[in-house]
Amino acid sequence: MTTFEELKSDWDNQPKQNPPRGGSELIVQKINGLKRKQWITNIVLLITVLILIGFFFYVEAYNNTTVTFALFLMVSSLLVRIIIEYFSIKKLQEIDVTVNSSVFNDNIIAYYKKRIRTHYIITPIIIILYSLGFILLLPSFKKYLSEGFYTYIIFSAIIILIIMVLFFRKQIKKELSIVKGL
């Protein structure tokens, strides 16, 4: 019985863990910050969709099947991402911070796993589809734009793509670290 008594003594002598002051408020602030960032992402994506739709009608793309398909790829990939972010925001809002810590932890872990899938599987597919749509537009750009402007579009698109990927990578790491910290 000595081991049981030693175990009980160790248990009784362990330091008391007090919850951090304002711990729940801090969690609520972090969750609200994540929701705000996701809403900002959706607004930026929606503005991009509206610009692409406006471009579709401005250049009368409905007269050219390739341009129509390219713009469809670009718009639909962004719409998929908007829908994913919308449901992610709803899922985040459904997480109850007042439940006991193990239930909250399970909910956060499930949310975290979905965000990992979104960021590391779905986001690259969306970027590839969007880029494919842009690449399909290049022959039309070459046909209707000057050589200098066409070259500018290609170089700026490559630079923007690299910057976007680096920015997404940084934001994804930041978001996942916040969720992991919860």
Image: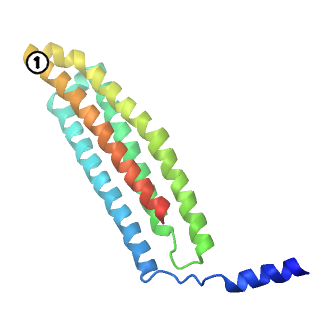
Rendered view: 112 above or below 100: above
Q: Nearer the viewer, residue 80 or 28?
A: 28
Rendered view: 97 above or below 39: below
Residue placed at 57% from the left, 58% from the top?
110
Percent from the top left, x then y, of residue 148?
A: 8, 17
At mark 1, the secondary structure is loop
The quarter in which the N terminus is drawn is: bottom right
Q: Quadrant of residue 53?
A: top left
**Which colour scheme appears in the figure?**
rainbow
Rendered view: 104 above or below 118: below
Q: Nearer the viewer, residue 123 or 181?
A: 181
Q: Quadrant of residue 153?
A: top left
Residue placed at 73% from the left, 80% from the top?
10
Q: Nearer the viewer, residue 16 or 171?
A: 16
Residue 113 in sight here: yes
Q: Is residue 148 left or right of residue 73?
A: left
Residue 146 in sight here: no
Q: Is residue 165 left or right of residue 178?
A: left
Tell me the amino acid under the disc marked 1: Leu
Percent from the top left, x then y, of residue 124?
A: 42, 35
Residue placed at 24% from the left, 43% from the top?
48
Using a 10 Å C-alpha cutoff, classify the residue at mark 1 as few (fewer than 14 neighbours), some (14 to 19) or many (20 or more). Answer: few
Q: Nearer the viewer, residue 118 or 84?
A: 118
Q: Quadrant of residue 138?
A: top left
Q: Is residue 78 left or right of residue 142?
A: right
> Which residue is label 1 attached to?
145
Residue placed at 37% from the left, 37% from the top?
77
Q: Is residue 133 left or right of residue 2?
A: left
